[in-house]
Image: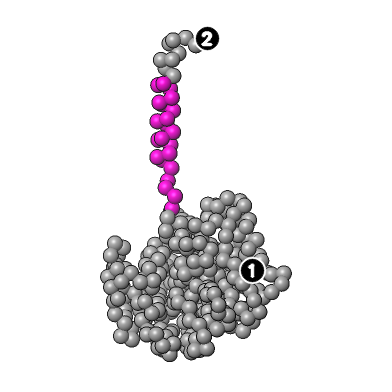
Amino acid sequence: MLERGDLAWRPAVLLGALLLAGAAAAQEPPEPTGAEWELRALGVPAGERLEALRTIADRRPVTLAIVGQGGVSTSLLAAGSGREVAVEYRNGATDPQANTHDTQAARVILDLTSRLGVQVRLLVYHPGAPFSEVADAMASAGAEADLVAFFQSFWGSEASLIADAIGAASRCLFISPYVEYGGYPTSTCVQAHSAKPWAEGCAHFVTAAPVAFRAPGRLLQPAAAEEDTEVINFLAPSYYASGAGGTCPAGEVTTAVAAYVLAASATRPTPEEIIALMRETVIADETTLAGRLAWDAPAVAALLAQIAALATPEDGPRKLDAAGVLDLWAIYQRLSAH
């Protein structure tokens, strides 16, 4: 039987329990966002690992060029970033004073590289509509920069002008997101010329697709028709990818990883050496990926099944080069040993 006195302490006990639960919840760290999530997914969360990476990130500065028809705004890059942004305009380009796609891409790249301790000099090319002007910009950027990133797809017979310009600039690594566009065979797009270790392709040009924060367990599934010659070279964790089909943020993360390899290598690596190191260190371990991505086991298993289907298809052409997710911690371990 419940006595009257027992009722007096029960509300106090419940209140105390609620307060303790609230305090425990308040002490839990917030879920990482943006670059914080991407770095954790790359194996270098804020703390000892990230600080270790930074110790060798100053071996050389990196010159990055962004080539695109939207332009990059210096004023908007600097606004709210809390850091000085070194931007140099080339071939008559100027600040578009707009939050363009290329401005957003540059912001993501610089956010990551600054956290990694990489010193970046950014060159901006803003060619006009004719593909010949884009090709000239690619050639100029490839002659001066260490890395060239671009986030547009160029389709049709004249796209070969751009592909030829990229192919001739062999001292520079070119990076682009994997692209899909309905109604056109990918054999006619510039991205179809990216590196293919098992077939003909440009050895210093890679594409990337996202392992998206907002799409647990889902990955871009390209249509591998006979006329489809485009491949995905790398899978990059991206907080900003809108879903399985939003590939541009993967190009941004991959560019930041490549910039780190350039900055932290004992001697300046060739584009092929950068690609080889990134390819050899990708991770496909289910337990490790689950911890880094904060996905449940079924989502990680689904991701790995899709990776296997793209890298070693039962029928149709191979669509994935590096069969795993970029692993910056493994890259650091290789570089720090030299």
- The answer to whether residue 199 of the structure is visible from this angle is yes
Residue 280, percent from left and from top: 59, 69
Tell me which corner region of the image, top left, top right, bottom left or bottom right, holds residue 59.
bottom left
Nearest to the observer: residue 181 or residue 39: 181
Q: Amino acid at mark 1?
A: Leu
Classify mark 2: helix, strand or loop. loop
Q: CA distance from mark 1 to mark 2?
A: 67 Å
Q: Main secondary structure of the magenta part?
A: helix
User: Which residue position is annotated with label 1?
Assistant: 310
Residue 315, percent from left and from top: 71, 72
Q: Tag 2 or tag 1, which sits nearer the N-term?
A: 2
Residue sitting at 53 percent across and 63 percent down?
Answer: 244
User: Which residue position is annotated with label 2?
Assistant: 1
Q: Amino acid at mark 2?
A: Met
Circle on res. 53? none
In the image, farthest residue toward the right: 314
